[in-house]
Image (cartoon, grey):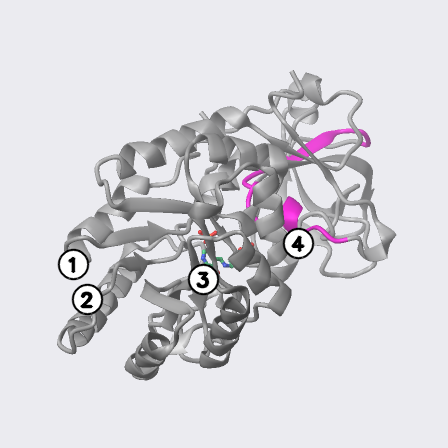
């Protein structure tokens, strides 16, 4: 069902490392393709910020998805993976000049523009190159999302996008510029969203905006609803494929597309989250009067989500559960080696009796795992391997 973790495959590989089950990734991509093949005007751009591992990117490119970048570095990485430049959308609240130049030089599909000053700079740089940049405006729809506060983006208090009240002003400004071509609107309300009502609220907001613009004779070619579909962190093994059917049905049922419009999605976590696990080794087990700690060789430098967002990644012991040990499990805190109290993966979780040398897997770590790793404490960055490499 879920990610396959065969401990024999991992013999001799330096821990910690990321492991990607390409069967899960391909099944996920197939599930998306099944849904979007029902519509010839739906396009999914994989949000590369979730995972930029080249081997993972190549599989996503083979599936024919487009790509959503938020930096020049991401554009360079996806070009290495072979993505066609005509499928790149480029978002980000602070694009540097060199990044805009790169996007223009590569003739990307669209810049998602987040402010008037940015629009002016894109127009200037495009003029200097004798080019015309295709632009959409990222609009802040003031729609909340039921998710962690650090990953909501669509509220007026968030730094993202252009205010709805300024919509006509920016569109008219763009229409007066020679080196940008205004094509549509872009939205993104947050990440790890499991309540379809949040996406329904976004669809309704877009309908209102479209009616308002249409009354003024402004037609949109592109509607981009961003990403945000969540995954099941609690039951990843039973439920590895996100609910794409319900997700796309929301837009089909609630968003009133006009003839000739294309609808774009930017899914990240839902595509790569469940195919990845962080594999780590138990260094020590230590006890005090109130706690048993499993101290592992990975820390928040390898997987920062628990420390940053109070996220829970299901932890399984790949070694202990297969050996002849006492049948009853114990309750542990699983912690890393970094000199900060927030370097804790989870507290008071049941595991089989765990010993030095046991391999543990932190599941659902394919999205915002490897890519958010850092070298704090001069630690090594984790490697990433696919199941096709480790046979
Ligand atoms: N489009 C835009 C404009 C975005 O800002 C994001 C994510 C996405 C698409 C993809 O969202 P997804 O489908 O993956 O939810 N590091 C955090 C998540 C940050 C998401 C940032 N933006 C985490 O580990 O939970």
Q: Nearer the viewer, residue 200 or 161?
A: 161
Q: Residues within 10 Å of mark 4 (few under 14, many from 20)?
A: many
Q: Is mark 1 within 8 Å of ligand 1?
A: no
Q: Are marks 1 and 2 in contact (CB under 8 Å)?
A: yes
User: Residue beneath label 3, please?
Assistant: 111
User: Residue beneath label 2, please?
Assistant: 207
Return the disc, 3 or 2, that comes first in the chain's sequence: 3
User: Residue beneath label 4, please?
Assistant: 304
In front: mark 4 or mark 2? 2
* 385 horizontally vs 179: left or right: right
Find the magenta span and give its range.
356-374
| 359 within the magenta span | yes
Return the disc, 3 or 1, that comes first in the chain's sequence: 3
- Cα–Cα span, label 3 and label 1: 23 Å
Secondary structure of the residue carrying tag 3 is strand
In front: mark 3 or mark 2? 3
Q: Nearer the viewer, residue 337 or 329?
A: 337
Q: Is mark 3 within 8 Å of ligand 1?
A: no
Q: Quadrant of residue 105?
A: bottom right
Q: Residues within 10 Å of mark 3 (few under 14, many from 20)?
A: many
Q: Nearer the viewer, residue 273 or 217?
A: 217
Q: Nearer the viewer, residue 73 or 3?
A: 73
- Cα–Cα span, label 4 and label 2: 37 Å
Give how far across and how far down residue 239 sits, in percent. Answer: 41, 35
Return the disc, 4 or 2, that comes first in the chain's sequence: 2
Give how far across and how far down residue 259 sits, in percent. Answer: 14, 54
Secondary structure of the residue carrying tag 4 is loop
Residue 256's label in the rendered image is 1
Query: Which residue appears at 16% of the width and 74% of the height?
Result: 217
- Cα–Cα span, label 3 and label 2: 22 Å
Q: Are marks 4 and 3 in contact (CB under 8 Å)?
A: no
Q: Is mark 4 within 8 Å of ligand 1?
A: yes
């Amino acid at each position: 069902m879920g990610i396959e973790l065969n401990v024999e495959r991992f013999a001799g590989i330096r821990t910690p490392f990321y492991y990607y089950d390409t069967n899960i990734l391909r099944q996920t991509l197939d599930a998306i393709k099944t849904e979007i093949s029902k519509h010839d005007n739906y396009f999914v751009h994989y949000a590369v910020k979730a995972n930029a591992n080249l081997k993972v990117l190549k599989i996503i490119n083979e599936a024919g998805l487009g790509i959503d970048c938020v930096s020049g570095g991401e554009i360079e990485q996806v070009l290495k993976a072979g993505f066609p430049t005509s499928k790149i959308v480029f978002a980000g609240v602070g694009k540097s000049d060199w990044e805009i130049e790169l996007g223009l030089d590569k003739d990307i599909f669209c810049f998602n523009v987040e402010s008037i000053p940015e629009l002016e700079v894109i127009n200037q740089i495009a003029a200097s190159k004798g080019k015309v940049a295709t632009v959409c405006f990222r609009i802040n729809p003031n729609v909340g999302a039921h998710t962690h506060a650090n990953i909501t983006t669509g509220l007026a208090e968030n730094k993202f996008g252009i205010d709805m009240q300024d919509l006509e002003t920016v569109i008219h400004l763009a229409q007066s510029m020679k080196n940008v071509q205004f094509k549509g609107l872009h939205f993104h309300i947050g990440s790890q969203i499991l309540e379809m009502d949040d996406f329904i609220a976004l669809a309704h907001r877009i309908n209102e905006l479209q009616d308002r613009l249409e009354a003024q004779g402004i037609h949109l070619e592109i509607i981009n609803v961003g990403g945000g579909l969540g995954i099941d962190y609690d039951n990843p093994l039973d439920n590895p494929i996100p609910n794409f059917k319900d997700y796309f049905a929301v837009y089909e049922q609630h968003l009133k597309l006009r003839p000739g419009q294309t609808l774009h999605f930017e899914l990240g976590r839902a595509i790569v989250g469940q195919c990845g696990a962080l594999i780590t080794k138990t260094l020590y087990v230590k006890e005090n009067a109130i706690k048993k700690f499993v101290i592992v060789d990975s820390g928040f430098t390898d997987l920062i989500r628990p420390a940053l967002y109070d996220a829970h990644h299901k932890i399984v012991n790949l070694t202990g559960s297969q050996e002849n040990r006492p049948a009853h499990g114990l309750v542990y805190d699983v912690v890393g080696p970094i000199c900060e109290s927030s370097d804790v993966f989870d507290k008071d979780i049941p595991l089989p009796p765990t010993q030095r040398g046991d391999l543990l897997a932190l599941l659902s770590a394919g999205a915002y795992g490897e890519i958010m790793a850092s070298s704090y404490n001069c630690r090594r960055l984790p490697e990433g391997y696919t199941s096709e490499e480790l046979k």
